[in-house]
Image (cartoon, rainbow, N blue to C red):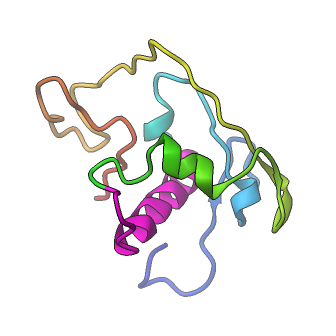
Amino acid sequence: MDPDTPGNQPYTDPSGNPILTLADTSWFGPAVTWPRELYNYPFIYFWRQLDEAIAAANIAGMGPEILGDDAWAALFESGALAENADIRMRMVTTAGFAALLEEDDQLGNPRPAGVFGDIGAIEMP
């Protein structure tokens, strides 16, 4: 990910295995701190890139939500993806999820105050 460093620079999972493909990405807990764990960056990066690609496509009817439930359901069917059988999609709807908002980001800067917060943000130095 460092454009000034030549060669492949993979992130590694908690066991030290390189994360080289989308199938290697995963959600690594614990649930309270997963966004700040470096080995979750490829997972977050993938979803951020997908979100940006969808926004750039200017799909009619998509506003600030960009990838809402209806759009998500139209993109994939449940089960293994045709391009990689190791990736399986499943839609689950839950009610009452709450995320713990930290007061500071990974660099020690105060997070935004108020009702909203960035629970999936990765701060780059």
Task: Return the x and y of residue 112 as percentages of the image width and height.
Answer: 14, 35
Q: Estimate the x, y position of residue 98 in percent, counting from the top left.
A: 40, 17
Q: Is residue 120 left or right of residue 79?
A: left
- Compare residues 38 and 74 and report the one nearer the observer: 74
> At 55% across and 49% down in the image, what residue appears?
72
Q: Give the residue at x 33% y 47%.
A: 65
Q: Residue 82 at what x, y percent from top left?
A: 84, 64
Q: Was residue 48 drawn as part of the magenta stretch in this picture?
A: yes
The magenta-colored residue range is 39-62
Magenta segment's dominant SS is helix
Considering depth in this image, is 80 or 41 the residue closer to the camera?
80
Q: How many marks?
A: 0
Question: Against 39, is 18 above or below?
Answer: below
State whether residue 67 appears in this view. yes
| Residue 33: % across, % down | 46, 28
* Above or below 95: residue 101: below
